[in-house]
Amino acid sequence: MKKYFQFAAVIVGVLALAGCGFHLRSGPSLPDNINTVAIESARAHAPLARALKTSLNVYGLDAVPTDTNAKNVNIYLLPEKLERQLLSVYPSGQVAEYELIYVVRYRVQFPGKEAQMAQFEVVRDYQDDPDQVLAKSRELELMLHEMRNEAADIIVRRLSSQAVASVDLP
């Protein structure tokens, strides 16, 4: 009897998901004729460029050095910016919480098309504790690493949607 309830619960869950229109999203992809992306950065060895190369590899796309190959999608990463905004203060006047805003700007050029500028922000809240400076500085480094990885994923998803929009229809 217990197995019937489990089976019924699974069937009800599947029907509920199907009924609400839920479907799995496929990974970002570029048109078949484009499978490499050339990445150039304003800063040599920029952490965002490394994260973007890793993200492209996860999605099965090749990151290649910048060259004049007309079949490559070219991405030029402009210098990123990290801003902090004060959110709250302890009664003693010390800062308790910040909002970290990671601003990413880049230029993307598809073969045979004009370059397009793009910008977006990744935002996180960061609680500061003046009594644990070393632990909080490590936490901040990890948070910045996660923000860069999220920014790289956003660039790849946007690249995929821009590629679909830039395909010439017959």
Image (cartoon, rainbow, N blue to C red):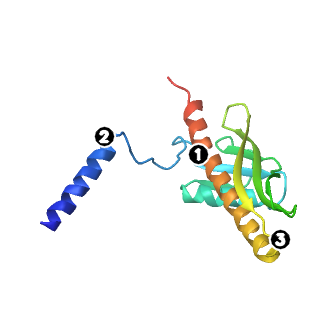
The amino acid type of the residue labelled 3 equals Pro
Please say if 136 is above or below 114. below
Q: Residues within 10 Å of mark 1 (few under 14, many from 20)?
A: some
Q: Residues within 10 Å of mark 2 (few under 14, many from 20)?
A: few
Query: Label 2 belongs to which residue?
Result: 19
- Label 3: which secondary element: loop
Q: Earlier in the sequence, mark 3 or mark 2?
A: 2
Residue type at mark 1 is Arg
Going by the numbered disc 2, the residue's amino acid type is Gly
Report the front residue among 170 and 139: 139
* SS assignment at label 2: helix
SS for dot 1? helix
Q: What residue sits right under mark 3 in the picture?
A: 130
Q: Nearer the viewer, residue 26 or 150?
A: 150
Q: Nearer the viewer, mark 1 or mark 2?
A: 2
Are there few (<14), some (14-19), or many (20+) residues within 10 Å of tag 3?
Answer: few
Which residue is at the front of the view, 153 or 33? 153
User: At 71% from the left edge and 67% from the top edge, which residue is drawn?
Assistant: 142
Vertical relation: 6 (above or below) 26: below
Percent position of residue 18, x then y: 31, 43
Alpha carbons under labels 1 and 3: distance apart: 38 Å
Tell us which disc is closer to us: 3 or 2.
3
Residue 105 % position (x, y): 77, 44
Q: CA distance from mark 3 to mark 2?
A: 50 Å
Q: Which mark is residue 157?
A: 1
Residue found farthest to the left: 1
Position in image of residue 134 (x %, y %): 80, 76
